[in-house]
């Protein structure tokens, strides 16, 4: 297995830097069980879904599992960008791990496991129907259980409202009436969502972000009664920091009694990256980050001492990126553009065969795109292909996937490879794309006999900042460049584009193999994918 270091949060001297993960693990939730921390995140239409990350110290994380082998419901055999698995929650109760997640068009689902590293149960839809999102289960000391959730205006017609319902103690259904417990439209907390529920010193707490993903803040509600009324307080704002919209995440503690908060920051192209903040208490209200100048709320830190986890050792690490495909299973860094089929690929022990899948859509809507999250603000990714086994009309290449995407593809025509650079733009309606437009730029043909290997270099470089609108300013402006070579040394630029994220997700990059022939037996061999840092 190729190893590489792209983004380490651990500074190796007892301190860490934010973000702890410069990758699109959006809407994170986390728990501590003994000396182990587990975190999950949204995955939308990509599969496998609901990534599960593990850490011993809250700073160094690895992807260790996926809760879903595929997205529930048959329609996810095709990519439905922006739909699927939204903001989830993870809890541990009486020996069982619970992963609760919303699908805004289908309902609220629950999956369980006694071993989080093993196979999770088939998800159960515990509240069928569109509209509810961002659910979080909670078990009280008296044995009763509850579910708190937000709403999606695009599915239910209104927003900024939190609901509570009693839940079966086994987590497999709801009991009784649903109660509106907070209306952010009436409390200057518009777009309040993503609730996470806890209890401390007799107070019920609901941590919930408000104000919008890119420009908002972190709010906390509290009450002595589970159904309210709830009072509220803003406990973290951007302040003088560079961390816009610091919110939506998880309160976790350590065995030594410290409190910490994991949240995300939307940086546009790279998606929603993960931060870790210290957390303290004032008069039974949390303060997240560091309070400045007498403020009763905190601001995000960029460097801080590592959590005191009681002497537990954790190696400095990060999620995997590079891959030489020598494992017996596909690496956990990979996700497909939709629910996968076993016949799409084969691991040979020394490489990966990508079989040519019939193409009947725009490139960005192909289900068999094999993709990864961006792992750093700047990086390069080199893919080595053997394309000698393509059949007539087959093609293979590398894609940069977002609502605007770019790709290089090599099509087999006779004894030639015909490369082209293709630009695509998905134009969205209310929920789904109305249209996808693609343009093609042809590149010089390659004699197959002179191309024992094809190398594609995908480079992401920050070239400045950009304002998205009047309120959303100073976001990174990344330039994505795709180049190719037949010798791994002399590269020719195929095309470049400004990075535009996907629908609620950051840009992903990866590989594909497709065909104009339904009966094709051709395939591409991916020998390795190697990520490296670049020097600005």
Image (cartoon, helix red, strand yellow):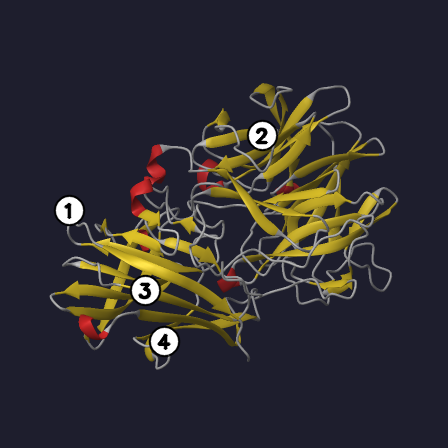
Q: Which residue is nearer to you in this view: 154 or 317? A: 317
Pointer 3 or 1: first along the chain: 3
Residue on which the image places disc 1: 519
SS for dot 4? loop
Per the model, the C-alpha gap separating discs 3 and 2 is 39 Å
Pointer 2 or 4: first along the chain: 2
Pointer 4 or 1: first along the chain: 4
Per the model, the C-alpha gap separating discs 2 and 4 is 45 Å
Percent x, y of residue 531: 48, 66
Pointer 3 or 4: first along the chain: 3
Determine which quarter of the picture holds residue 497: bottom left
Q: Which residue is nearer to you in this view: 309 or 31? A: 309
Q: Are marks 4 and 1 in contact (CB under 8 Å)?
A: no
Residue on which the image places disc 2: 113
Determine which quarter of the picture holds residue 105: top left
Pointer 3 or 2: first along the chain: 2
Residue on which the image places disc 4: 488
Q: Are marks 2 and 1 in contact (CB under 8 Å)?
A: no
| Label 4 Cα crowd, 10 Å radius (few <14 / some 14-19 / many 20+) | some
């Amino acid at each position: 297995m190729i190893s590489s270091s792209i983004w380490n949060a651990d500074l190796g001297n007892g301190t860490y830097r934010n973000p702890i993960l410069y990758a699109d693990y959006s809407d994170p939730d986390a728990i501590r069980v003994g000396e182990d921390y587990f975190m999950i995140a949204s995955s939308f239409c990509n599969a496998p879904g609901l990534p599960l990350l593990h850490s011993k110290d809250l700073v160094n994380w690895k992807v260790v599992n996926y809760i879903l082998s595929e997205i529930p419901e048959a329609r996810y055999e095709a990519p439905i960008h922006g739909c699927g698995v939204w903001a989830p929650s993870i809890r541990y109760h009486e020996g069982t791990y619970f992963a609760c997640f919303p699908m805004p068009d289908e309902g609220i689902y629950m999956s369980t496991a006694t071993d989080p590293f093993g196979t999770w149960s088939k998800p159960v839809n515990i509240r069928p129907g569109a509209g509810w999102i961002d659910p979080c289960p909670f078990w009280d000391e008296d044995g009763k259980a509850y579910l708190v959730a937000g709403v999606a205006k695009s599915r239910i017609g209104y927003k900024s409202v939190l609901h509570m319902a009693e839940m079966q103690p086994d987590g497999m259904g709801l009991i009784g009436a649903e109660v509106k417990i907070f209306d952010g439209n009436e409390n200057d907390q518009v777009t309040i969502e993503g609730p996470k529920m806890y209890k401390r010193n007799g107070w019920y707490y609901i941590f919930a972000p408000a104000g919008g993903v890119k420009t908002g803040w972190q709010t906390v509600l509290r009450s002595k009664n589970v159904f309210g009324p709830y009072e509220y307080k803003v406990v973290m704002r951007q302040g003088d920091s560079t961390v816009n919209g610091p919110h939506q995440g998880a309160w976790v503690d350590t065995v030594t009694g410290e409190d910490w908060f994991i949240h995300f920051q939307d940086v546009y192209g790279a998606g929603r990256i993960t931060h870790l903040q210290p957390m303290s208490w004032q008069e039974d209200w949390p303060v997240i980050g560091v309070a400045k100048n007498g403020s009763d709320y905190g601001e995000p830190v960029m460097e801080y001492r590592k959590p005191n986890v009681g002497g537990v050792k954790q190696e400095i690490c990060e999620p995997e990126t590079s891959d030489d495909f020598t494992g017996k299973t596909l690496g956990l860094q990979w996700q497909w553009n939709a629910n996968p089929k076993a016949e799409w690929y084969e691991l040979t022990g020394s490489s990966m065969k990508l079989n040519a899948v019939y193409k009947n859509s725009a490139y960005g809507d192909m289900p068999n795109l094999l993709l990864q999250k961006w792992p750093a603000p700047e990086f390069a990714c080199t893919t080595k292909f053997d394309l000698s086994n393509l059949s007539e009309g087959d093609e293979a290449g590398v894609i940069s996937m977002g609502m605007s995407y770019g790709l290089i593809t090599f099509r087999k025509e006779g004894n030639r490879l015909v490369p082209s650079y293709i630009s695509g733009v998905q134009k969205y309606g209310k929920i789904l794309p109305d249209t996808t437009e693609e343009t093609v730029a042809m590149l010089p043909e390659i004699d197959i006999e002179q191309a024992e290997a094809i190398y594609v270099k995908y480079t992401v470089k920050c070239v400045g900042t950009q304002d998205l609108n009047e309120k959303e300013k100073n976001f990174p402006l990344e330039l994505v460049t795709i180049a190719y070579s037949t010798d791994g040394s002399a590269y020719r630029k195929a095309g470049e584009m400004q990075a535009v994220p996907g629908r609620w997700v950051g840009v992903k990059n990866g590989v594909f193999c497709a065909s104009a022939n339904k009966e094709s037996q051709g395939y591409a061999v991916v020998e390795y994918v190697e990520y490296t840092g670049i020097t600005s």
